[in-house]
Amino acid sequence: MLDQKTLDHLWNFRDPAASEATFRAAMIENTYDADERAELATQLGRAIGLQGRFEEADALLDNIDDDEPTVGVRILLERGRVLNSGGRAPMAVPLLEQAAELADHLGEEFLAVDALHMLSIADGANAEVWMRSALEYASTAHDDRTKGWMIALHASLGTFLRGKNRLTEAMVEFQLAEQWAERLGTERQRASAREAITECGEALAEGP
């Protein structure tokens, strides 16, 4: 199967149309076997979904004919993403739960955390529970690529807590996001964490 870093290299999340073209081109290369092309197809579905073509993305994902377990996880995950983005979050939740459970069973740590993070978005009523579950899972991961989730997850939890006016707790999360960004992140992530700390500090200084 494909290493996550390989997929990272093919993705440009700021330009899903360009990513669509990249994945279409990759899928016809002779360097990938059938399972890997199926895995690439799941990412093509994601790129199409990011452009708002939800029915097309769902149909593509539904037609991927591959019984490799990791491909199955990615199909569940990407179908959940498409449903959530298309305004059908309640339908996304069971698929994302299945993705998280199967990824955990397979030892696919990155995908398990990804599914838990998506659950925090799709299942808004339990967002904090899912975020904390994702943080706990990522904290025990064996590779730095998966541990890198700690940056976004702490930042997301901080934003959630700030929205609930739990500012002291939010500050802790933003500070943890900065610590992880210093360790594993990009300069953009470090700057974003510092900005969140500054804004939260100002809110704390203003008081209730």
Image (cartoon, rainbow, N blue to C red):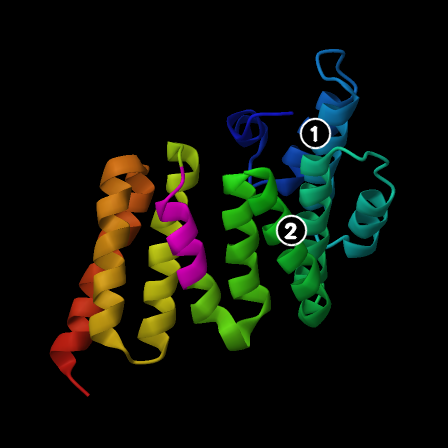
In the image, is residue 193 part of the stretch drawn in magenta? no
Residue found farthest to the left: 205
* Percent position of residue 165, x then y: 29, 80
Residue ID for mark 1: 23
Which element type, helix, strand or loop, lies under badge 1?
helix
Segment tinted magenta in the rendering:
132-141
Mark 1, residues whose alpha carbon is within 10 Å: few (<14), some, or many (≥20)?
Answer: many
Query: Residue 145 sits in which quadrant?
Result: top left
Q: Which mark is residue 99?
A: 2
* Percent position of residue 102, x then y: 64, 47
Residue under the point 75% across and 34% down:
41
Dominant SS in magenta: helix
Instruction: Give the camera-side residue of 28 and 127.
Output: 127
Instruction: Kindly report the distance in space between the C-alpha atoms of the residues bearing marks 2 and 1.
Output: 22 Å
The residue mark sitting in front, 2 or 1, is 2
Q: Amino acid at mark 2?
A: Ala
Q: In the picture, which quadrant includes the C terminus?
A: bottom left
Could you tell me if residue 140 is visible in this image?
yes
Q: Which mark is residue 108?
A: none
Q: In the picture, which quadrant includes the N terminus?
A: top right
Residue under the point 48% across and 64% down:
130
Instruction: Give the camera-side residue of 38 and 135.
Output: 135
